[in-house]
Image (cartoon, rainbow, N blue to C red):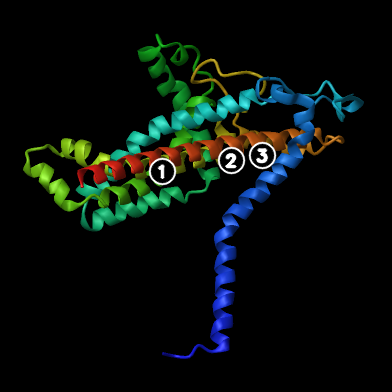
Amino acid sequence: MRRVSSASKAADRVFKVATGICASSPVLFLLAIGIIVIVQSIPTIHYMGWHFISTIQWNMGSLYGSMIHKNGVSVPSGASYGALVFIVGTVASCVLALIIAIPVSILTAMILAYRVRGPIGFVLSILVEILAGIPSVVVGLWGILVLAPWVSHQFGPFLRSVFGFIPFLGGSTGSGYGLLTSGIVLAMMIVPIITATARDLFRQVPLLAREGGLGLGMTTWETVRYICLPFIKDGLVGAIALGWGRAMGETMAVLMVSGNAINILPHNIYSPISTMAAFIANQLDSAQTDATGMAVHALSEMALVLLVITLFTNLLARFLVNRTTRRRSVKAGANG
């Protein structure tokens, strides 16, 4: 047996410490971010309480007038910080983006995994991954120049004429800057993430299982429906959660096409909105002019709400995946 030198033992200890630090860094970073936004949110929590997430009125008050004191904090006269408009805009645009992106991503992933082979398949896969790397400001500029006018003059009137009997799809199509345009832009940005992940998942389905389905007389769709999708559904939930997280945090592209609505809830799918991430980026400079700092604290609480929603949805996705995995393990043990 080779004798281990003292230098090798020291290197091994350094290696263990380094790997431990690297492995714990994601948790430490998350804790650091969470602690910072919580501490910065405390003054607004004292001032607004639960009204912060149930009020639609956002007003920084008279920044150069008298101050008022409430619950131990000083705020400008007339100040009110309500995040409901931005919470609704964020959730609505992300849900709409998923409704658009999920079928497109799954069908594209099927084609890339099973139908397109050779150089063409390689090129298409590269193009999907390149789409994920396009800067959001470029997508936002495309949304301003192309998508918003198209939604306002063509797609919006078409939806209204066909589905106008549905309350949320009727009414004025406006200028094209709003919820529908934001949802389409977000869908474009999350389709590559879901597609790339789903493509790799489809390729993990055993070849014998797929060929067995076709050999039993199943059509291609039946093989995908009854063999491939059940096999990858756990991973597919994770892929959708990744897309949801990207959509929740997207800032610049949504800021450019959302219409930047404040103090008004969307009344139809064409209405202007504002998301939490976009509003924080848009208002941070103005908030720093507040001598009391309450506007910055309010934006910090909005960041806290965004963080909580994102973490909750990701934990929910992980719970669903783990529950399905446990059920499969129980069934496998019972059959064994």
Q: As drawn, is 90 to the left or to the right of 192?
A: right
Q: Amino acid at mark 1?
A: Gly
Name the disc covering residue 9, or none: none
Q: Which quadrant would the N terminus be assigned to in this image?
A: bottom left
Q: Earlier in the sequence, mark 2 or mark 3?
A: 2
Element assignment for label 2: helix
Which residue is located at x 12 percent, y 42 percent?
213
Which residue is located at x 54 percent, y 85 percent?
8
User: Distance of mark 1 from mark 3, alpha carbons?
Assistant: 28 Å
Provide the residue designation for mark 2.
Answer: 252
Provide the residue designation for mark 3.
Answer: 281
How crowded pointer 3 is (Cα within 10 Å; few <14, some 14-19, many 20+) is rated as: few
How crowded pointer 1 is (Cα within 10 Å; few <14, some 14-19, many 20+) is rated as: some
Q: Is residue 79 above or below residue 221?
A: above
Quadrant of the rendered image containing residue 228: top left
Disc 1 or disc 3, which is closer to the eye? 1
Disc 2, disc 3: CB below 8 Å?
Answer: yes
Provide the residue designation for mark 1.
Answer: 238
Q: Nearer the viewer, residue 223 or 136?
A: 223
